[in-house]
Amino acid sequence: MTETNPLRIIARKTVPAQTAEAQAAPGMYPRVRPRRNRTDAWLRGMLAENTLSAADLIWPLFVMEGENARDPIKTMPGVARQSIDLVVKSVIEAHEYGIPAIALFPVTPFELKTEDGREGWNPDNLMCRTIRAIKQAVPDIGIVADVALDPYTSHGHDGLLDEQGRIVNDESIEVLCKQALVQAQAGADIIAPSDMMDGRIGAIRDMLDAHGFQDVKIMSYAAKYASAYYGPFRDAVQSGGLLKGDKKTYQMDPANSDEAMREVALDLAEGADMVMVKPGLPYLDIVHRVKTEFRVPTFAYNVSGEYAMLRWAAENGALDYNKVVLETLMSFKRAGADGILTYMAMDAAKLLRKDR
């Protein structure tokens, strides 16, 4: 006979059969009370299925030319472009609060932006100078260096364009390899290609190995979607107003999930040490699939648009920012992320220390 009582169906899956009968009996108070395990803070902590700490966080920082210079980003309340000296101070503070790594994004002066993005592989560019300064001040903090051409190109794309305005894959990889090499030479611990060119992970791995950087790790933006959530980031690096067209021919379609698994598999086969899903909150299902199917170090990027939504909601009284910070970041851990790139990293680290 097929069971039709929904209470018994649910109970049978979660508690012993005799308890299910008792629960279903009319007029009886429940013997099984899940709330009992929620009554005490110490027990809630002990039974927590996931934990969040500063060690889970990577803090993205925007660096610009100048000295003692700070330029607030209007579309990212609380975030600013900073000169190298101020970035170093921020990194020192991050290290003191237990944040293990930072991710760097340069704001290239407009006069240095070119069609081919050649400033990207200048060994004395803003990114490389910042890496060296950080390593001198805080040698044991991890530095994640972005590899893509959009901060350096006059057209705002992550790769090179042909005469018809199309992104050319293999030619782009050649210059991305040069970019990765100068970053490794400057002292980057992790090279993070975010361009989404086909085959770039293998080519960068070969380039790094050939020059003695076998220990430099690659964090592949393996599942990077063509998302509208990147708007504030493009404002931050001043590439959005330059962008000709869109990035849909190389970044992924938000409708696709299986395709992300293929991208991850390819990047791992080419030598990626860890993979990333970007954006974060609208793609937690992808984070979960990647972690479940591949069981490799999996990261997620809590991107600029996600951050800006929470900030503006909090500033207008709709949310308690401090509470949603930790709840939001916990959702990444619950989905399976080993690490989270987030502009809320310092806010979260301070709240977590306060909670101890």
Image (cartoon, rainbow, N blue to C red):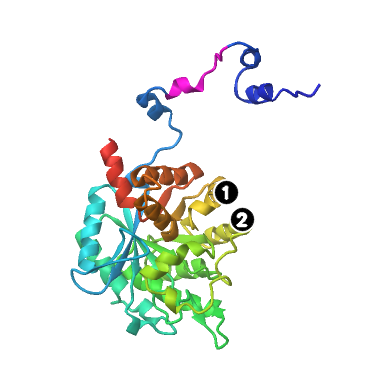
Q: Residue furthest left?
A: 68
Image side of residue 311 versus residue 134, left or right: right
Residue 30 included in the magenta stretch of the image: yes
Image quadrant holding the C terminus, namely: top left
- SS at mark 2 in the image: loop
- SS at mark 1 in the image: helix
Taking 164 as reference, is 7 above or below it? above
Q: Position of residue 293 (x, y in %)?
A: 58, 48
Q: Which comes before the other along the chain, label 1 or label 2?
A: 2
Range of residues picked out in magenta: 29-38
Quadrant of residue 106 in the image?
bottom left
Residue 96 visible in this rendered orientation of the protein: yes
Q: Residue at x 42, y 82 (%)?
A: 154
Measured in 3D between alpha carbons, the distance from the residue under mark 1 to the one under mark 2, in whole angstroms, is 9 Å
Instruction: Write down the residue under mark 1.
Output: 289
Instruction: Write down the residue under mark 2.
Output: 257
Q: Position of residue 32 (x, y in %)?
A: 54, 17
Image side of residue 12 versus residue 275, left or right: right
Q: Residue at x 56, y 13 (%)?
A: 29
Q: Residue furthest right?
A: 1
Q: Amino acid at mark 1?
A: Arg
Q: Residue at x 68, y 21 (%)?
A: 8
Query: Which of these two is toward me, 95 or 61?
Result: 61
Q: Position of residue 152 (x, y in %)?
A: 39, 78
Taking 161 as reference, is 326 above or below it? above
Q: Are marks 1 and 2 in contact (CB under 8 Å)?
A: yes
